[in-house]
Image (tube, rainbow, N blue to C red):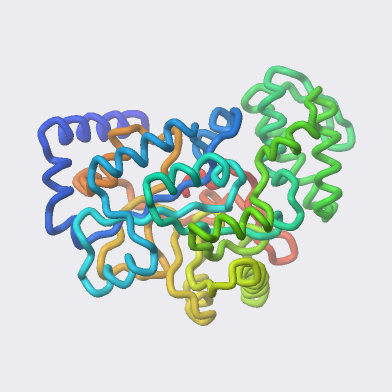
Amino acid sequence: MALVAGIKSAVLRIAAATGVFKLVLNSEWRRQRLVILCYHGIATHDEHLCFPDFYMHPSLFEARMEHLRKREIRVLPLDEALDRLEAGTLPPRSATIGIDDGFYGMYAEGRPVLRRFGFPTTVYMTTYYVDYNVPVFDPIAEYLLWKANGQTVEWKEIFPEPIHLDDPGRCRAAAMVRNYAILRKLSGSAKNELLSELAGRLGIDYQDLCARRMLCLVNAPELREWAREADFQLHSHRHRLSRARETFRRQLGENQTVLETLTGRKCHHFSYPGGMYLPEFPVWLREYGIRSAVCCGGGLAAPAVDPLLLPRVVDSSNLPWKHFDSWITGASALVPRRRSVFDPDQLMQVLEDEGEVLQRSFHAAAGK
């Protein structure tokens, strides 16, 4: 894999140096395609160091937006972009920007940048933590263990034996904390108490993290304010997927009710939690009246693409600049890539609990 990545980087460097990027960007082929950029969180402290696949420093996010401006990328509202993609009337260098989850850091640090550049944005919002505004359980558990790097944690109720928090130890400890909460069907408040106790055992001030809104989503007033500038769309109520059709629809309906109540607007676009899906999900979304859905797998949306399986480019701290530029110009299409194969056991890394398909962690969505 390292060899393949090295070869790809070398090819992209040569393509950029010889003007291929610019040639592709201004081609008729590129004009017929839409780049859907995906972002998650903007760091308010050091989240980008813990979650480089999902968070980025505010300065990097601003630099990315400046690069879009310099490349003269036309950032379109999602509905307009899809209308024009279908009709074959996209303007040159078209893109849309989507934000998953609705983390506070994106609201506080990313939203002013987007406003300054005048870029329209779609926020795919999960809604359970909007009213219950505490840190999101899975990522904050991983963050606490990451902050305690090098320590040894003892907690016989959860860990059968002391765990040294090196890289493998942190992954093992995070899985045990998640499994403990799932097997005992802990409520949101009980999970928050569990996090508080974990933080105490690690010598971390959990109340300070809560006060700083670390790994929290926006609350209802913030969502209403943000909705003046962004288009809020569906991401499921609890950031879960289900193999059961009625449970899937219930999660979608709860999500839709909260968002439409807060924004006063209809929702008809969706982002698969974790970017992953099963073959029946597009069918169910179509029955529900959803117009589009974005999933995992990098690529440009072409005219014949299934609107319920739209590819997107997930930007992050770990995406090199040349790779970012290759996606927005379209030159990435010149480099052969391994076809993304969906495997629930390997890609989703999920737990099934009473028919629910749950994401195991932030890192479980690395293929997003």
Q: Closest to the observer: 3 or 195? A: 195
Q: Residue shown at 83%/55% (left/top)?
A: 187
Residue lying at 53% horizontally and 65% vertically, measured from the top left: 233
The reply to whether residue 244 is in sight is no
Q: Outermost residue toward the right?
A: 157
Q: 142 or 217, which is in the foreground?
A: 217
Q: Hey, which quadrant is residue 239 in on the image? A: bottom right
Pinpoint residue 348: horizontal percent, then vertical percent.
Answer: 55, 52
For the point 61% across and 45% down, the residue is 104
Q: Which residue is drawn at 75% across and 46% down?
A: 134
Residue 165 position, x and y percent, is 70, 23
103 shown above or below 162: below
Q: Is residue 238 left or right of residue 330?
A: right
Residue nearest the observer in this picture, 197 or 46: 46
Quarter holding the N terminus?
A: top left
Task: Residue 82 in the image: state x and y as whole percent.
Answer: 33, 68
36 relative position to 201: left or right? left
Q: Is residue 71 left or right of residue 195?
A: left
Residue 300: quadrant of the picture: bottom left
**Front-lying residue, 283 or 47:** 47
